[in-house]
Amino acid sequence: MSTMTTSTPGTPSTRTPPARPESRPARRGRRLRALVGAAYAAPTAVMVCLFFLVPLALVAWMSLHRWPLLGKAKFNAPANYSGIAEDELLRSAAWFTVEYTVVVTVLLFVVAFGLALLVQHRRPGVGFFRTAFFLPMAVGFASASLLFLGLLSDEIGPVTDLLSWLGLVDGYVSWTSGSPDSALASAVVLVLWRFAGFTMLILLTGLHAIPPDVYEAARVDGANRWQTFRRITLPLMRPTIALVLTLMTTGSLLAFDQFWILTRGGPDNSTTSLVMVIYREAFIRLDLGSAAGISVVLLAVLVVFTVLQFRVLRRRSS
């Protein structure tokens, strides 16, 4: 007997055409493209392994040992981690680093965003100001710190003489070592001068990525400048703002050069950052294991903080 398949009117057939087997030349082409892609990615993967993954694994291994600079390492886990909570200098450095991060992040973002809005539109002379704002980025950070150290010196620096001539200060002022507030302010001004132009450039890129039609529609609807900034510019700038805030907070938590050159952590260790504590543990106390333990904890804090920051900004954006 022969069987017949019937289908009701309006009901599509459930039969699917058989998939064609992939030909041998097509499989060879796909494998060749995969090999070419792997070959392009191989140098980057090797560099990441050699200069990131291997040192990271070595630091994690060192953090479980008492590792003198000269001598044989001894396993002492978890002494390097348990000693972190008992280190008074480390606690004060952590609190100062958080305070410095908050101050620098807020001020740097406000200044950079203001500069980006100032040079956003094309007009005569705007190219000069963009270049002038970005120019301090061409100076190395260590060189910029030495430059500010000379400018703020109470012996040879012109800043104190200029402020005295204007009547703003009375006599010589030790900006980098006189008081904790003046030392912190000196480092903050250095960071603002050095990084405001670079941050402005990133924010300016985000501003130029906003379609002009959106602003035109807002003007037609009668929105003023503040409403346009709050309802259009800020929401559409969230990815760029997230990138900028991550860069600023990470760089501030890892601050070292400005404090090591300008203040040496003084006065009375009031401007000692976390990275300075790691440096002292490794190269002054010659205890690489303790320095590695602090580094691992700091890395974990940075990862957690970055993930939380991206989640908050992504949730607000959605």
Image (spheres, grey):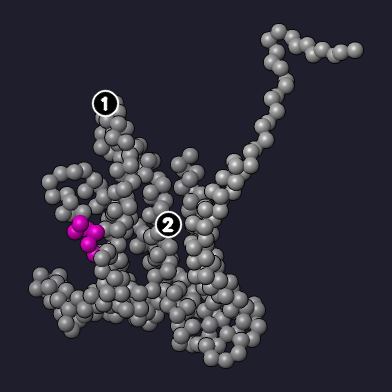
Q: Determine whether 196 is above or below 167 in the image.
A: above
Mark 2 and mark 1 lie on one chain; the one further toward the N terminus is 1
- The image quarter in which residue 66 lies: bottom right
On screen, residue 267 versus residue 292, left or right, reads left
Q: Which amino acid lies under the numbered mark 1 shown in the image of this protein?
A: Val
- In the image, farthest residue toward the bottom: 71
Looking at the rendering, which quadrant does residue 135 occupy? bottom left
Q: Amino acid at mark 2?
A: Thr
Residue 133 belongs to magenta span: yes
Which residue is the site of mark 2?
246
> Secondary structure under badge 1?
helix
Q: Quadrant of residue 223?
A: top left
CA distance for labels 2 and 1: 36 Å
Give 67 or 249, whichever is nearer the viewer. Answer: 67
Which residue position holds label 1? 220
Predominant secondary structure in magenta? Answer: helix
Q: Find numbered disc 2 in the image and state the secondary structure of the residue it sits on.
A: helix
Instruction: Name the residue located 53 percent from the left edge and 91 percent from the top edge.
Output: 70
Kindly give the residue lying farthest to the right in the view shown.
Answer: 1
Q: Please name the residue shown 52% across and 65% down the image.
A: 46
Residue closer to the observer: 119 or 38: 38
User: What span is in magenta?
Assistant: 131-136
Name the spot of residue 145 as percent of width and height, x first: 28, 74
**Quadrant of the drawing holding the N terminus:** top right
> Residue 28 location in percent, x, y?
60, 46
Residue 270 or 218: which is nearer the viewer? Answer: 218
> Which residue appears at 66% of the width and 83% of the height?
75
Q: In the drawing, does residue 154 fall left or right of residue 44?
A: left
Seen in the picture, residue 23 relative to 34 is either above or below; the reply is above
